[in-house]
Amino acid sequence: MRLTLLLLLASALPMQAQTAKLAEEMKPGDLYRYELTLGITGKLNVMREGKPVPLPLQAEATHQFVERIENTDASGAAGKVIRHYFQAKSASTVGTEKSRRELSNERRLTLTSRTDTGTLHICPTGAFTREELELVGEHLDTLCLPGLLPNKEVVVGATWPISDAVAQVICQFDGLYKNNLQGTLLAVSGPMATFQIAGRAEGTELGANSEVTVKAEGKFDLTAKRIVEIVWTQNDVRGQGPASPAADLSVKVTLKRTPLTEEPKELSEEIRTKVPADKIPAGMLVLSHTDPEGRYSFTYPREWVIVGRTKEHMVLRFLDKGEFASQLTIATWKKAEAGQHASAADFKAAIAKLPGWEPGEVLEESEMPGKPGRWGYKLSAKGKQDSTDVIQTFYLLSGPLGDQVAATVLSTPGKIAAVGTGETELLRSIVLPEKK
């Protein structure tokens, strides 16, 4: 009788709620291995002849890398890490066009660090191409992982807000308008806690308004005190921007994260000496481009974004706080005899025939000094392009073997200062063939 009564009383007592401390205490020297897979489906809405044309999109990517934390920031998250990518590749189909990208062997060692303007990725052994930078810089930002946690003990069912700073970075926004992402502790089972991140965020990406709806689930190892797994799903609705088309996308990322106890040889002390400890040299901050047919190559500041490319020309745009500031078009020009070049008069005549161009006041006209065997001509003028007030600068550059490149820079008058010297640096870096 007494035993039965005791059992009944015990069953009437409230059960103690399960709790878990979800916090990562990171320190320099911590090591991890990451495996990420990405899948994207949806459509791009490109403008053709003034009308939006939907193009189906499908993409996948795989990343595998090891990482060593070099320092932490004020919040205790990783501020600077050195990585070695064993694999970084993607494949995509837009409409009927297929594309494949893979990180070259020479660019597998990287330095990733937090800056006042976002996350910076460099390679200490040479300049990235734009495609390589996108491979290492546009997967799920693993530096944000500690920021997804409440950094305290919480009960199952409890929620916590995701900070604006973390939401902006993990949603890959340049600027954040609105954020209601929040975390929830779903369950605790043995040494593993399961949590969820869900909600919406709005911001800008490459000058385009974007709305992201997130539903992700993660695993936190209570023994290792680390996030070890996340399945991150989100829907993106992005408007038309000055450097990107409108898009409606569904994204799924699967991440596995393993704390390491032994230093991988790819991140040994000898390897780490190749990475700048303090100030990053200017040569590591630019991007490189080589014409697929070997007709020219150049380096350029990262603020310039490639928005179009054909066999004969490529187009880059410079954005100032998300607004269009300048456009640069580089095109091959008819080849001259070795040691010769087209005349300035012929180039001026070609400029006068450009469709939509109404020249006005000439601001500068001059030949450009260069290395032996090189010749350059520059013509800058105010005018109207398709009835819009602009400043256009036209360049013709010639190499010792007669190879020639024409470049046109179109800028809105109020944005000249924002572009700065980036245009000049790019044009000076153009290399034309010198030997057969």
Image (cartoon, rainbow, N blue to C red):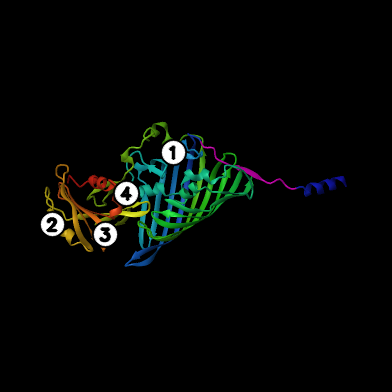
- Residue located beneath label 4 in the image: 418
What secondary structure predominates along the stretch shown in magenta?
A: loop
Q: CA distance from mark 1 to mark 4?
A: 29 Å
Mark 3 or 2, nearer chain start:
2
Name the quadrant containing residue 53.
Answer: bottom left
How many residues crowd around disc 1 within 10 Å: few (fewer than 14), some, or many (20 or more)?
many
Frontmost residue, 214 versus 357: 357
Q: Say which of marks 2 and 4 sits in front.
A: 4
Q: How busy is the neighbourhood of tag 2: few (under 14 within 10 Å), some, or many (20 plus)? A: few
Q: CA distance from mark 4 to mark 3?
A: 17 Å
How far is disc 3 from disc 2 in space, using C-alphas? 25 Å
In the rendered image, residue 95, in percent from the top left (x then y), is placed at 37, 63
| Label 1, label 2: how far apart the Cα atoms are | 53 Å
Q: Residue at x 47, y 49 (%)?
A: 170
| In the image: residue 245, left or right of residue 381 | right
**For the residue labelled by badge 3, is the local secondary structure a helix, a strand or a loop?**
strand
Amino acid, disc 2? Asp
Label 1 or label 3, whichever comes before in sequence order: 1
Label 2, on which residue? 346
Going by the numbered disc 4, the residue's amino acid type is Ala
Q: Is residue 112 visible?
A: yes
Question: Which span of residues is magenta-colored?
Answer: 14-26
